[in-house]
Image (spheres, rainbow, N blue to C red):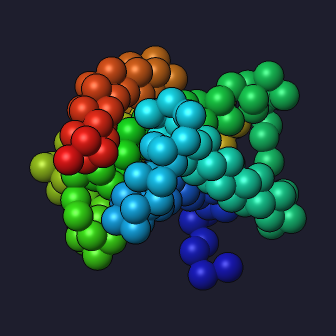
Amino acid sequence: GSINIPGVDYKEWLLPGIMAQTMAFSSFVVAIGLNNDLGKGIVDRFRSLPIGRGAVVVARSVSSLIHSSLGIVVMSVTGLFIGWGINNGLFLGLVGYGLLVLFGFMMIWIGILVGSSLRSVEAVQGVMFVTIFPITFLSNAFARPEGMPPVLRWLAEWNPISALVQALRELWGNEGFPLPPDAALPLQYPVTATLIWTLGLSAILAPLAIRAYVRRTTD
């Protein structure tokens, strides 16, 4: 009730942004958990067992996705109680959830890279807070980019999180505000942009994360 925008259901407009933020924070879980396992020697104990080198990373990644997905389920149920809903049918609704999981998969590689590269949980928390938090807030998750100063607007419109949020709003029928005609390409074609961002960044981050993990576990 504190945010009253005539003609716009802010609850419906906001919830996709909060869900995208939640998936972005999935990198926190895997980064801190993996760094903790490495620092306490748990990974070294696993290496003495007949399991693959990447089993720990895979397990951490899957657990992080499950953790974040449960959060999305809780938010979806809560959203239904406060008036949010998927207005474009079941299929497009599932496509939106699929994009969320795919984006979370990409963010996990960031967590593996940071968790493997740094030597303490405190350092991991510091790096993740000063990178992930500004990225999520400098997006269209909570406010429209067209109301921002030119430089911040450009950064927000080309932010991968903004493309994901816009894709969710369009797929779920939660647009609220009309997209301005001069919006950046990622916001005009958000589903395509989200796929390009997630797959492209995964292709870059995955080799770096695996290399950092292998280097850390062979020291």
Place of residue 77 in the rendered image (x, y in percent of width and height, measured from the top left): 83, 58
In this rendered view, identify the residue nearer to me: 11 or 39: 39
User: Can you give x and y, in whole percent of width and height, for residue 24 in the image?
Assistant: 46, 51
Q: Is residue 184 above or below residue 9?
A: above
Identified at 78% across, 40% down, the residue is 86
| Percent x, y of residue 61 | 53, 43
Q: Position of residue 117 (x, y in %)?
A: 22, 51
Question: Quarter of the image holding residue 134?
Answer: bottom left
Q: Residue at x 57, y 74 (%)?
A: 3
The quarter of the picture where the N terminus appears is bottom right
Residue at 22% in and 59% down: 118
In the displayed image of the protein, which residue is found farthest to the left?
151
Can residue 13 be seen here? The reply is no
Q: Dividing the picture into quarters, in which one does residue 171 lie?
A: top right
Taking the image as shown, residue 151 lies to the left or right of residue 108, namely left
Image vertical order of residue 171 relative to residue 24, above or below: above
Q: Residue at x 33, y 55 (%)?
A: 115
> Is residue 215 among the parts visible in the rendering?
yes
Q: Nearer the viewer, residue 165 or 54?
A: 54
Vertical arrangement, residue 129 with respect to residue 168, above or below: below
Question: How many numbered discs?
Answer: 0
In this picture, residue 205 sits left or right of residue 50: left
